[in-house]
Amino acid sequence: MTEKIKKLKNEISKIIVGYEDIIHKILISIFSRGHVLLVGVPGLAKTLMVKTLSQVLDLKFSRIQFTPDLMPSDILGTEIIQEGPNGRYFQFVKGPIFANVILADEINRTPPKTQSALLEAMQEKKVTVLGKTYELEEPFFVLATQNPIEQEGTYPLAEAQVDRFMMEIVLDYPTFENEIEIVKRTTIDREYEVEKVLNRDDILNIQRKVREVPVGDHVVKYAITLVRQTRPSESKFDIVKKYVQFGAGPRASQFLIIGAKSNAFLENREFATTEDVKYIFFEVLRHRIILNFLAEADNIKVETILSEIVEKVPIKQ
């Protein structure tokens, strides 16, 4: 499996230049049964990255372009009337949510009613339409993209919706060398094709193996301590008490540990460590901290607060 994962990353690199760390963290989330929110300005290949990933993983891929007029039935599906030998009957027509990899493109461009249609699917792996419940096929991942610079005509994601995402991964501009390679590859008459490396059964097997990775009590205590220090009522840090309105909940602790296990598995190590927890700390916590008005007035960012916590919380609990 280690060789397969190495080949998987090599195949993705045929299409996506750079962003090796980003891809690694997306794989951590996938193998942890989590969902990912990708945040970045237009033109950073967010959509291409997700599509390439689904091709390499040999999974059913579905793209949903979120727009202000998108309705929940456009995502989940609806029942239509059909004519049969015994008269008319209702037949359920599945929506694009019935796939393995869902690309929710520009998720913040649709109203909250439609955004919430994803909630049950992301958490319960099932959808309910007109009182009937339909199971979604495993594995099931939602990888949503969000443009951070355009706020006009957008609907901020509700806290309950954001908390369903295991990670919020921020994409930055490529390096100078990577941008040279991107321009060279995309301005010639050649198409790069990727091979399918992992199938559905491989991924389900990896997800089970990840949960079997041992993790010491001191690692669990370290992860929980980091999360609890983001809560103003419990934190010993003045910057948290002053600028944070709401800290992260227990789901953040769960994601830190399962993510640490997944990273250890990807790196072919026998157990998870505190370094694995620190590696995904920002991505897991970034979108779970709600700052107050004073933080906005003083131009305090979430990353500033998280940096102080992870730097000053001792590893040995």
Image: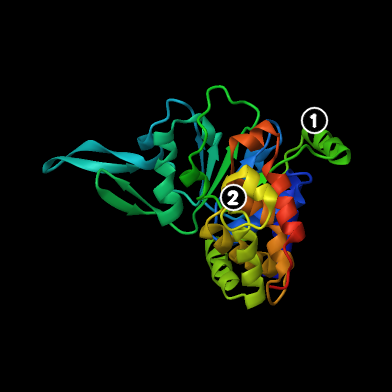
Residue 264 location in percent, x, y? Answer: 69, 69
Instruction: Please name whichever residue, 194 or 236, is drawn nearer the observer in this view of the structure.
Output: 236
Q: Look at mark 2 in the image and give the residue it sits on.
A: 54
Residue 175 location in percent, x, y? Answer: 84, 40
Q: Residues within 10 Å of mark 1 (few under 14, many from 20)?
A: few
Q: Quadrant of residue 278?
A: bottom right
Q: Is residue 261 left or right of residue 177?
A: left
Q: Above or below — where is 86 with respect to 197? A: above
Q: Look at mark 1 in the image and give the residue it sits on.
A: 187
Kindly identify the residue that appears in the image at 48 percent across and 40 percent down.
158
Kindly identify the residue that appears in the image at 21 percent across and 36 percent down.
81
Residue 8 in sight here: yes
Residue 300 location in percent, x, y? Answer: 70, 39
Residue at the left extreme of this rendering: 86
Instruction: Please name whichever residue, 67 or 53, is drawn nearer the observer in this view of the structure.
Output: 67
Residue at the right extreme of this rendering: 177
If you read the primary sequence from the N terminus, does the residue marked by circle 1 or circle 2 appear first?
Answer: 2
